[in-house]
Amino acid sequence: MRILDRGTIFDATSAPPEARFCSVPSWVRLENGRLVVAFRAGSSKDAADEDTPVLVSNDNAATWRLAFAGFGDLPPGRGRIRATALTPLDGDCLVACLTWVDRTDPGLPLFDPQTEGILPTRTLLAASDDAGESWAVLGEVPLAPHTGNAITGPILILQDGRMALPYEAWKEYGDTRPGRHHAALRLTGPGGLRTSEEPSTWPSQWPELAIVAHHPEGQVLYWDQRLTVAPDTGELIAMLWSHDRRSGQDLDIHITWGSPDARRWTPPASTRIGGQICAPLALGGGRVFAAYVHRRHPPSLRAILSDDFGRTWTASDELVFYEKAPGRESGMGGSRDFSDYWADMTIWTFGHPTPLLLPNGDVMVAYYAGDSTAMGIHWVRIGL
């Protein structure tokens, strides 16, 4: 692997105060070559003014234009969108899953330090029929009995045409019961979301639940699942930031393999890769590209390849495509209390790598990076 080019999608250093801290990019390439990216922006990494603008590029990421400023208050004075994940459908049509957060009291942090729950959330769907220029919120996807939910990536199109919406479930603010973490999917019926149907019906078309990863005793938490579908076999991979609550330490990144219908998953297994969020991209023929957060010393973003569908990884060919300025990342020197991780997440200055396959076989990765004053969205193009 080699770095071919790099650039900036959104320069937060010159942004207004309410958009200085960006993260969680999601992007797609449409049939006509347009790149569409959505990301979270706010006055801090945990701010009640957060929103998810959408930018577009028609010149292979050389320049970017703001197409959609964000969803604003939904409804006024109640909540904001924290994450938007994009999936292309036909032509200029896209669907997005959204994480809505209750911001009725703007002074409350996302995480309750007493109970370890999070502010009430809703999972919404939105649609665009003009290549990301405008968006209509369609409604809420019911995820009961799960609460404390957050999306963990874009809607996947399965081999049989059905769709899978990935999310993780925890518990809500003020809930004193032990949290029960699940990495999960909601599945549509046959045919997925039919673009011939009224989009307002789409939020109700997720009748089936599939559990990707869950530790029955709650000792291991499988956070931030990132998934990919093999283009030839339809098999799935989920890669998981894994944390042992008993020791208070991260484990190596774990992986699980899913059947083409996304209903059956293997028990999570260690990849022997020391990292946090890890986003795989199946290339076909058993090859898998993965971009991951290496928050140990030296803090960096890295890419790694597998030739056997994630069963082994070629560490000798690992590529560092971003490295933080000298210094250690908060909390990575040893055991951490669970609540400390939530505090760390508000100060970490890089992460959320998101890969995108180009028609010529190169891979582009979007990610956020910056410092304590501003964090923008960047990209790197990697030749395989």
Image (cartoon, rainbow, N blue to C red):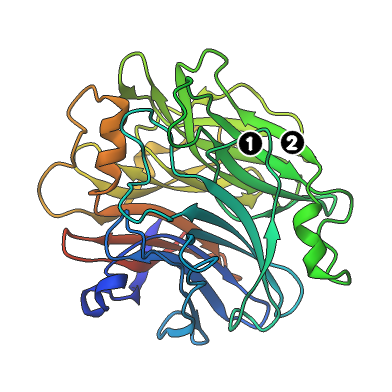
Between 128 and 136, the one lying in front of the other is 136
Instruction: Give percent across and percent down for residue 294.
Output: 30, 42
Distance from the alpha carbon under mark 1 to that under mark 2: 7 Å
Residue on which disc 2 sits: 209
Q: Secondary structure at mark 1?
A: strand
Residue under pointer 1: 184
- Label 2 is placed on what type of residue? Leu
Q: Position of residue 293 (x, y in %)?
A: 35, 45
Residue 79 locus on image (x, y percent): 48, 59
* Residues at circles 1 and 2 in contact by the CB criterion of under 8 Å: yes
220, 381: nearer the viewer: 220
- The answer to whether 39 appears left or right of 107 in the picture is right
Q: Give the residue displayed 39% in from the left and 64% down from the top.
A: 50
Quadrant in the rendering for residue 18: bottom left
Q: Mark 2 packing: few (<14 Cα in 10 Å), some, or many (20+)?
A: some
Q: How many marks?
A: 2
**In the displayed structure, does residue 276 sit left or right of residue 16?**
right
Give the image location of residue 34, x and y in percent. Answer: 58, 81
How many neighbours does mark 1 have within 10 angstroms: few (below 14), some (14-19), or many (20 or more)?
A: many
Q: Earlier in the sequence, mark 1 or mark 2?
A: 1
Q: Which mark is residue 295?
A: none
Label 2 sits on a secondary structure element that is strand
